Image (cartoon, rainbow, N blue to C red):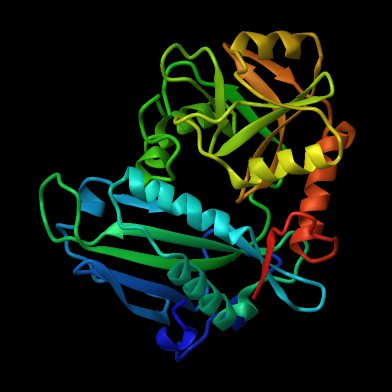
């Protein structure tokens, strides 16, 4: 392990903490005082440091800008009842980061650099973890090419960073989504299973088109025939159909969501039947028309559980039952939040205390 003292720490001279109202802080716009940085040069990681949050000096020729050689993760820290700070499944984020890194030809980040840098940063910025209902510290690890080179090739130099920001709920109301059958988020053999920046950049335009029609987000379908359900916006999508928790099976066009996996584990722990399989658009529409879809929700780090109010398809909106009548997703949200805040036992070993 790399010892924490090998991480050089430069504390900010002027904390912005006193300026923040945690009860009203907007998602993703207010950043904590510090950030972690590590450089990969000459085949090894070096120069581990925590410095005040600020802008980066960067060559205008870096491939991260020109060719999208960049990946990221999303995770959260929570304040427990005794003031302790809990990280939720951080090793799973580290593993997924390296899966994405392999796909995008980026350097692997060792566990000790990821975890020691993360722990040191959150320890330093621990006062930024909100103690408000629904509040948490959103953490963004990311990795990008740092070469100074114009041309398509695997890079030799990389930068790994972690920044963080206090947040409240991502969605304040149930979301309205529509099924997308023209634009494509990912295809078989592509980068859909990686948290690569380009996956998200390419999704903004079709999402905007749906928002112009009054929806919050899309339900993505497969890139070949638009026949099967894949994801919902930037989240995995899950349904309770005839009392069974159903979600699209993992593939190389679907991100392996950590929240998705947590929901499945809780459901099985409670004895609920689950199915990970292909879900066709036609099957979902038939179940909606027949009122057999009891619940529908997105599952992801930012929103945790985002109840879906309605699903639109070709000009028709299909409404789901009121959120108050959805026992499963409500229970999942409460149970996961209680585990994250140390208010309930953690039977799965998900919590890493800072």
Q: Is residue 243 above or below residue 211?
A: above
Task: Please indicate whether residue 349 sits to the left or right of residue 8 in the image.
Answer: right
Q: Position of residue 193 (x, y in %)?
A: 45, 37
Residue at the spot 28% in from the left edge and 46% down from the top edge: 68
Residue at point 81%, 78% (across, down): 82
Residue 292 vertical placement versus 266 (above, below): above
- Name the quarter where the C terminus is drawn: bottom right
The number of discs equals 0
Residue at the front extreme, as displayed: 1
Q: Where is residue 288 drawn, in percent x and y?
A: 74, 14
Q: Residue furthest left?
A: 150
Residue 269 in view:
yes
Q: Residue at the spot x=51%, y=77% of the render?
A: 121
Residue 192 screen position, x and y as percent: 43, 34
Whether residue 199 sits left or right of residue 236 in the image: it is: left
Q: Is residue 55 visible in the rendered structure shown here? A: no
Please state if 89 lies on the left or on the right of 63 as rendered.
Answer: right
List x then y, in percent, for residue 171: 66, 46
Residue in the foreground of this view, choosing between 120 and 45: 45
Q: Is residue 273 above or below residue 301?
A: above
Query: Which quadrant of the figure has residue 26?
Result: bottom right
Seen from this angle, which residue lies furthest bottom?
Answer: 13
Q: Residue at x 59, y 29 (%)?
A: 215
| Occupied quadrant, residue 48 | bottom left
Q: Quadrant of residue 61?
A: bottom left
């Amino acid at each position: 392990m790399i010892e924490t003292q090998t991480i050089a720490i430069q504390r900010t001279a002027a904390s912005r903490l006193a300026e923040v109202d945690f009860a009203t802080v907007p998602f993703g716009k207010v950043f904590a005082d510090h950030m972690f940085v590590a450089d990969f040069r000459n085949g090894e990681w070096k120069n581990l440091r925590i410095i005040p949050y600020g802008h980066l000096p960067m060559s205008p020729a870096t491939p991260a800008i020109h060719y999208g050689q960049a990946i990221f993760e999303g995770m959260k820290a929570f304040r427990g009842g005794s003031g302790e700070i809990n990280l939720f499944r951080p090793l799973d984020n580290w593993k997924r980061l390296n899966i994405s890194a392999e796909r995008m030809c980026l350097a692997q980040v060792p566990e000790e650099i990821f975890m020691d840098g993360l722990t040191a940063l959150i320890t330093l910025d621990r006062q930024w973890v909100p103690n408000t209902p629904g509040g948490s510290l959103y953490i963004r690890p990311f990795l990008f090419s740092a070469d100074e080179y114009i041309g398509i090739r695997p890079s030799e130099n990389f930068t790994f960073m972690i920044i963080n920001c206090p947040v409240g709920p991502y969605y304040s109301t149930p979301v309205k989504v529509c099924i997308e059958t023209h634009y494509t988020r990912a295809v078989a053999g592509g980068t859909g299973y990686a948290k690569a920046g380009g996956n998200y950049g390419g999704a903004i335009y079709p999402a905007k088109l749906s928002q112009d029609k009054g929806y919050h987000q899309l339900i993505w379908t497969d890139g070949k025939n638009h026949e099967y359900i894949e994801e919902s916006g930037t989240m995995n999508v899950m349904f309770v159909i005839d009392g069974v928790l159903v979600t699209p099976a993992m593939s190389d066009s679907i991100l392996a969501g950590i929240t998705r996996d947590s929901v499945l584990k809780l459901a099985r722990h409670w004895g609920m039947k689950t199915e990970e399989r292909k879900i066709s658009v036609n099957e979902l529409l038939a179940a909606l028309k027949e009122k057999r879809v009891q619940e529908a929700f997105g599952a992801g780090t930012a929103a945790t559980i985002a109840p879906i109010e309605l699903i639109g398809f070709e000009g028709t909106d299909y409404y789901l039952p009121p959120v108050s009548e959805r026992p499963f997703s409500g229970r999942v949200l409460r149970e996961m939040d209680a585990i994250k805040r140390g208010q309930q036992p953690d039977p799965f070993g998900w919590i890493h205390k800072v």
